[in-house]
Image (tube, coloured by chain):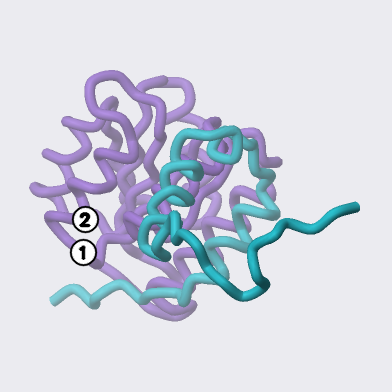
Chain colours: A cyan, B purple
Amino acid sequence: MSMPDAPIGLVKEVRYSLPMLLEELKAERAVGAFASEKLDQTEIGKLFKAKAPRRAKPKK
Amino acid sequence: MNFKGSILIVDDEPHIRKFVALIVRTLGITAVTEAADGEDAIARFAADHPDVVLLDVNMPRIDGLETLRRIKEVDPDAVVIMLTSLANRASVDRALDLGAANYIRKDTPKEEIIRSLAETIDAAFGPGDNQT
């Protein structure tokens, strides 16, 4: 198998910045197949438990 | 659990509200009010300041996620638990981002719904706290 001629380590073009990649990931999570994936209760529970529990503000 | 606070149940289906009210009463909670849609829920929340909101997602006019966002605008510390048949990742992620306290599927066995509600309320208010 032949290798491309470009020297290793030479970056010819930067197509994406990290913020752009994160935006694309966010969009994919919102509308793509990933977004419509059904989650079972165990997975949902893990997501919410991973987030630090927040205590309600006491009422006066 | 020794929670003596109030709960607002929001669902557009009357029989679901009745079922959820029965579940809530098994936890010893008697201060239960109901709303049939998001607009009604936001108005009742602003007027009554219930300690906990149990919120459906699929509802006419304003859906549950938008209702959650608006309730959090009124009170960022509001304890809102989503109780819904919609369990796709986008919906769960959105609820998490908006600050829901938990997200429970309606097709979860009743005993597990009760356990999840009790755990979430205990995490928010403490196992021995008495809300009024």
Mark 2, residue position: B72
Q: Which residue is mark 1?
A: B76
Asked if residue B34 lies left or right of residue B22, the reply is: left
Which amino acid type is marked by label 2? Lys
- Alpha-carbon neighbours of circle 1 within 10 Å: few (<14), some, or many (≥20)? some
- Is residue B36 shown above or below B102? above
Residue found 35% across the figure and 22% down from its top? B12
Left or right of A25? Residue B42 is left
In contact (CB < 8 Å): disc 2 and disc 1: yes
Chain letter for mark 2, please: B
Q: Position of residue B28 (x, y in %)?
A: 48, 57
Image position, residue B59 (x, y; %): 34, 24
* Closer to us: B28 or B36: B36
Amino acid tagged 1 = Pro
Residue, x 11% and y 39% (percent of image)? Answer: B43
Tell me the subunit letter for badge 1: B
